[in-house]
Image (tube, coloured by chain):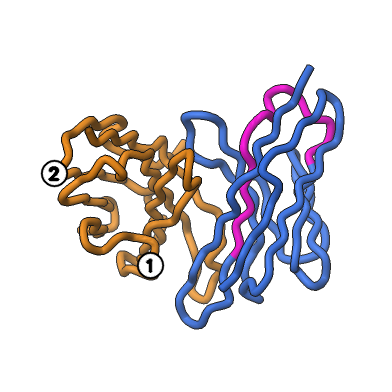
Amino acid sequence: LAKTTQPISMDSYEGQEVNITCSHNNIATNDYITWYQQFPSQGPRFIIQGYKTKVTNEVASLFIPADRKSSTLSLPRVSLSDTAVYYCLVGDNAGNNRKLIWGLGTSLAVNP
Amino acid sequence: DARVTQTPRHKVTEMGQEVTMRCQPILGHNTVFWYRQTMMQGLELLAYFRNRAPLDDSGMPKDRFSAEMPDATLATLKIQPSEPRDSAVYFCASGLVYPGGRGTDTQYFGPGTRLTVL
């Protein structure tokens, strides 16, 4: 069964770059690795997803090494509004059933 | 701006009562997910459906929980009988996955139902 590990919490300051890494093994070979952001009292919201190498959109970058055993979400120049919980999501490489494995979340606090 | 809707937004009930939560996925989405979130356990996937058929419900306690999709526009999660340990926020999410597509394709979450069982 696939398993994910991410740091429980991180602290940063406004304007800094923040990198959050999720370790994952036994993931499905043809599934995306996806990251979500969650604010209090809201449902998670999609940030970015990728299959391998590097993906960049208007809010973040995602780095995935060739072995796909980890992924790193990079938030450039964070602001106070980036304070949230960040989750990685992977698919389990377990036969026909599409088992989805969520990380436990990394609580990011951005300080002024 | 299409959104997933969930009703009710809040529910307070007494132990032993039946609870039904409803979700309207985004029109055209073929995959619906049910999650439970608590401070202690974090975000737990209970079950999910594709084209109204259950794909994985291994995260759901089968003795008291049931999930169904009567039609493509409605998903329900029922707890009978409810217990205090069921108190949590229940999220529904929907997504569009093409045949042979990736299970981790983008999910769009609803606002959640906050359930309190006394």
For the C terminus of chain A, which image quadrant? top right
Residue A40 highlighted magenta (yes or no): no
For the N terminus of chain A, which image quadrant? bottom right
Q: Which residues are magenta?
A: A75-90
Q: Which of these two is toward me, B26 or B46?
A: B46
Q: CA distance from mark 2 to mark 1?
A: 23 Å
Q: For the point 58% across and 76% down, which residue is it?
A: A93
Q: What residue does disc 1 label? A: B58
Q: Is residue B50 visible?
A: no
Q: For the point 55% across and 54% down, which residue is it?
A: B106
Q: For the point 65% across and 37% down, which residue is it?
A: A107
Chain letter for mark 2? B
Q: For the point 63% across and 33% down, which residue is it?
A: A84
Among numbered discs 2 and 1, the one appearing first in the sequence: 2
Q: Residue A44's x, y, as percent?
A: 53, 41
Q: What residue does disc 2 label? A: B16
Tell me which chain appears blue: A
Q: Residue A31's x, y, as percent?
A: 62, 69
How many dots with numbers? 2
The residue type indicated by label 1 comes to Ser
Q: Which of these two is toward me, A69 or A44?
A: A69
Of marks 2 and 1, the one in the foreground: 2
Tell me which chain appears orange: B
